[in-house]
Amino acid sequence: MSGLAMPPPTPKDYWPQWRGPSGQGLASEDNLPTEWSRTKNVAWSTEIPGRGFSSPIVWGDRVFLTTSIEGDVIPGVSPAPHMLGGEPFVHPDAVAGDKRHTLKVIALDTTSGKMLWERTSYEGRVFDARHRVGSFANTTPATDGERVYAWFGSEGLYAYDFSGKLAWKKTLGGIPAFGMGTGSSPVLFENLIILQCDEDNGERSFIVALDRRNGREVWRTKRAVQAGWSTPVIARTASRAELITSGNEFMISYNARTGKELWRVKGTGGWTVPTPIVAHEIVVASAAHPLKRAVAVRLGGTGDVTGTPQVAWERDRGTGYTPSSIAYGDYAYLLTDGGLLTCIDIRTGEVKYEGARPPKPGRFSASPIAFGGKLLLTSEDGDTHVVTAGPAYQVLGTNSLDERIHASPAATSNGLLIRTMTRLYRIGGAT
């Protein structure tokens, strides 16, 4: 085995990491289903144990998921302590840091939905608490076609082959995040697996790249960025690949091969969850708490580009706290937690429409995907709205699974993979 990424079965048959091949929620397959319900256009559904927050990934005939199963209180155990502004801090939504947890990786057959194997990666006490809406398996795994890599934050990184055999495991120590849990998913680049590890007030934050073959640390770079839950993204220009990270203090671009900083800009100014979006050599980072902010930066810069022409545009409204937005064609679509959608020309910042409301009100945690000139926006109530991409807002239809959904969909030529809190559905595709 080379340990390097194998050629995918076809570009349309895999969704290998958080938000797909590009990390941007863009499907290669255009002819995907746009109508379904619990009884219509469902190829199969499979019950998944635990709490359904991480998203499914796909490689050919395999679907991979992670899950967390909560056990009893462990007497005498308490989660990691936190400080904020020099004072002890306990987040009001932090829970379950005193309980036993079982963290698992699960493999299913894409065609039938049959569970092929499940492996317990970690079992016991956890380092820190989690948000009451979340789990200790929030992060989406990644695969290179030889192995699947499951990242459980302070509880470690685990590499399994496709038969479920553990190839290696790695711990990076405790990574406190104000008792909110880990949210940043692993990113694959060449022979590396990259993890953004931002903690509490940023004194020990870092980003690290490991060799996918053996878990050996290849590079590590310190970051003066406080706790965040954003997943990095690889953004490419004609001359280089940039590793883009988003955070409160800074959005920073690194050389993905070496970890050397390329440029930085003033960050989101808040607790950062959304993954940056990229199109036309422009990257947009955003957050929504305690203030709303989006900043669009042209790739290819050097040094601190704050206040320079490298900043294409900025915006102080219409951003989301939990869901990532999406860039598709010429436009950036900013999505709020309330489902309001704003369409912006990503090159100029010109607003095409603003605050368009979904036909059914709700909260949105899942991040959108795009294909065939359409956007799919999924609410926590299980409603997926199909919206026309482009400068005019039009809803083509709404589909409901009548189950709670926090995970983001995956899309391949075998259809859509949608994870609810208790089940994984395959919508459409040949059977």
Image (tube, helix red, strand yellow):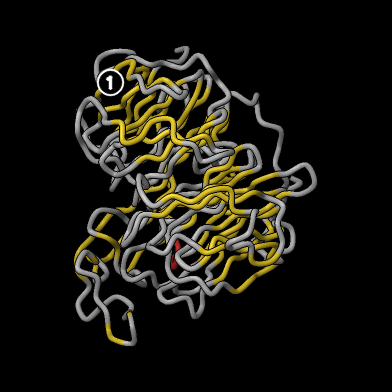
- The residue shown at (60%, 74%) is 222
Q: Residues within 10 Å of mark 1 (few under 14, many from 20)?
A: some
For the residue labelled by badge 1, is the local secondary structure a helix, a strand or a loop? strand
Q: Nearer the viewer, residue 53 or 340?
A: 340
Q: Quadrant of the N terminus?
A: top right
- The residue shown at (53%, 57%) is 158
Q: Which residue extends farthest right?
A: 239
Check disc 1 and report the residue beneath it: 399
Whole-percent x and y of residue 380? Answer: 25, 38
- The residue shown at (24%, 75%) is 90
| Quarter of the image where one finds residue 385 | top left
Whole-percent x and y of residue 417? Answer: 41, 29
**In the shown orientation, is residue 420 left or right of residue 253?**
left
Disc 1 residue type?
Asn
Whole-percent x and y of residue 94? Answer: 24, 66
Q: Nearer the viewer, residue 110 or 254?
A: 254
- The residue shown at (42%, 68%) is 227
